[in-house]
Amino acid sequence: MLNIAIVEDDPQAAGLLVSYLDRYAQEQGLVCNSVIFNDALDFLTGYKASFDLVFMDIELPGLDGMEAARRLREMDRSVILIFVTNMANFAVKGYEVDALDFIVKPVTYFPFSIKLDRAVKRLESRQERELVVPTENGVVCLKCSEVTYIEVMQHQVTYHTRERNYTGYGSLKKIEPLLPEKTFAKCNSCYLVNLRYVRQVKDFSVLVGEDWLAISHARRKPFLSALNEYIGSIE
């Protein structure tokens, strides 16, 4: 299933995108779950990294699409972003917010399907992995993409997610090989951070989701290097 957000204030334009998504899904044998947001603030308020793809209009009331995309990237570096706009001169600035592509209005199905092909291939290239977490209440399977960071204190492992935390036993040394390559990085001996959720780095601290974590002196340089490489890998 593809979870798709459409941020568009024109109901007719939003409806057209939904019809194209339905047509594409039928042709490709996919399931598309589309959610329409009439303005950017509604989309960003309470945002959770649950969407695979965002179609973003640039001309939006209040907060425009480009600024909304910048704020989106502060919360989610991995979600695929495609601008849909009649302002092609602004859309080409999409590299500033790691946009995959842009579609110029009026949208027709063929170029839309080509752009969507690119997005689907990108999603398929991201190998989703799951962690099997033994807890006191039984085994829990967590998608790696849902884990914001992993914390180890005296052989007790806490898997932090946006919804809740899960506690088990183990060590970072055993957990690290199970995680997607170049997506997680240590900021010190106690924390493995999902780089997707890094919002800010300040001196020797990193904001991961809503939590500030300490960066050790020894890990600061390799952690920043891993973060920069991760950001550079996102198209």
Image: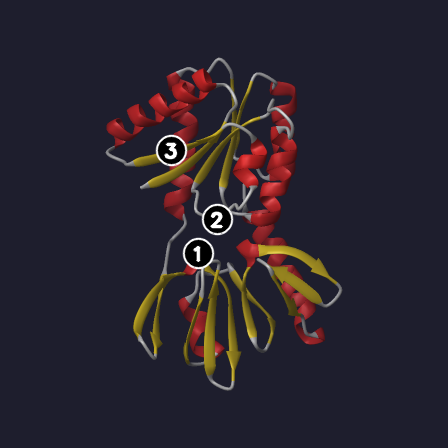
Give the percent coordinates (x, y) of residue 143: 38, 59
Count how many numbered circles sit on residues in the image: 3
Q: Nearer the viewer, mark 1 or mark 3?
A: 3
Helix, strand or loop at mark 1: helix
Q: Which residue is mark 2?
A: 49
The structure residue drawn at horizontal position 27% and vertical position 36%, both measured from the top left corner, is 30
Q: Nearer the viewer, mark 1 or mark 2?
A: 2
Question: CA–CA distance between discs 2 and 3?
Answer: 15 Å
Q: Is residue 197 left or right of residue 129?
A: right
Q: Is residue 120 left or right of residue 73?
A: left
Local packing at callout 1 (Cα closer than 10 Å; few below 14, some 14-19, many 20+) is many
Name the image quarter holding residue 116: top left
Quadrant, the N terminus: top left
The structure residue drawn at horizontal position 44% and vertical position 56%, both measured from the top left corner, is 145
Give the percent coordinates (x, y) of residue 227: 61, 57
Mark 1 touching mark 2, by CB under 8 A?
A: yes
Local packing at callout 2 (Cα closer than 10 Å; few below 14, some 14-19, many 20+) is some
Q: Which residue is mark 3?
A: 34
Helix, strand or loop at mark 2: loop
Give the percent coordinates (x, y) of residue 26: 25, 28
Quadrant, the C terminus: top right
Q: Give whichever of 108, 59 is nearer the camera.
A: 59
Local packing at callout 3 (Cα closer than 10 Å; few below 14, some 14-19, many 20+) is some
Q: Which residue is mark 1?
A: 145
The structure residue drawn at horizontal position 56% and vertical position 58%, both measured from the top left corner, is 195
Q: Give the residue at the far top of this rendering.
A: 106
